[in-house]
Image: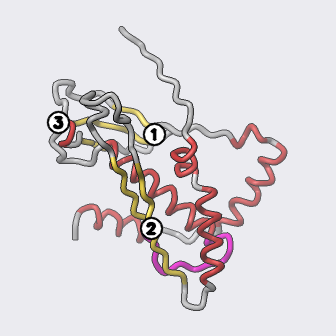
Amino acid sequence: MTQAKTCAKLVDSEAKVVDIKSRQDPLRERYKVAPEEALITDRGRTLEGELDDTAHIWVAPGSQDYGIEWKLGVHRAVGGLHDLPNPGDILCTALAVCMDSVIRMVANRHGVVLEDLEVDVTGDVDVRGTLVVSRDVRVGFQRMRCDIRVKPKTGTESAFVERLLKVAEHSCVNLDTLRKGVEVEVTHHIE
């Protein structure tokens, strides 16, 4: 068993079934009367590292200190070593985990028991854009695919599961952000 799978098993053994409806309903009511409380801020940041190591970056996910740091790499297609997950992998993973978690929450809210769920996100990038080989090529992902494999408990109506998946697709923050785009403000601080 790989270290990642071992870690996942340890986390899973601590997992608890949470009644999403009982947790979300008070929030939904609260946000109706206090919409300003519904605005949250997420965060990711790079950490100090060895600046002469151009192939690796340390990052800390989260708007609070979770005590987690990840070492990431740079894709071989742009000159990196491709020995660790790269920013494109993290973007795909962010969409996969967002979609997975929303599907689980929507299923839980509606009493649908899932026996299996896997979300696989892939993205295609023509790196000639980022390497400025061709200014006609977009720098970002040209295409992404989100493949959802779900197995509900035997006896669950497939039409109901399809509606559940449409609700989850509508409610996935990262999917909506990628599909519709978002304004990104970039500031520079030169010391």
User: Who is closer to the viewer here, 71 or 182?
Assistant: 182
| Residue of label 3 | 79
Earlier-in-chain disc, 1 versus 2 = 2
In the drawing, does residue 67 fall left or right of residue 22?
Answer: left
Q: Residue 104 at what x, y percent from top left?
A: 56, 68
Q: Type of residue at label 1?
A: Asp
Q: In this view, does 83 lie above or below 48?
A: below
- Element marked by disc 3: loop
Residue occupying image coordinates x 27% and y 38%: 127
> Label 3: how many residues lie within 10 Å, few (<14), some (14-19) or many (20+)?
few
Q: Closest to the observer: 101 or 161? A: 161
The Cα atoms of the two marked residues, 1 and 2, are separated by 20 Å
Q: What stretch is highlighted in magenta?
A: 107-118
First in sequence, mark 3 or 2: give its number. Answer: 2
Of marks 3 and 2, the one in the foreground: 3
Q: Which mark is residue 65?
A: 1
Mark 1, other Cα within 10 Å: few <14 / some 14–19 / many ≥20: few
Query: Residue placed at 30% from the left, 32% from the top?
Result: 130
Magenta-colored stretch includes residue 111: yes
Above or below 148: residue 127:
above
Would residue 155 be found to the left or right of residue 61 on screen? right
Circle 2: residue type: Glu
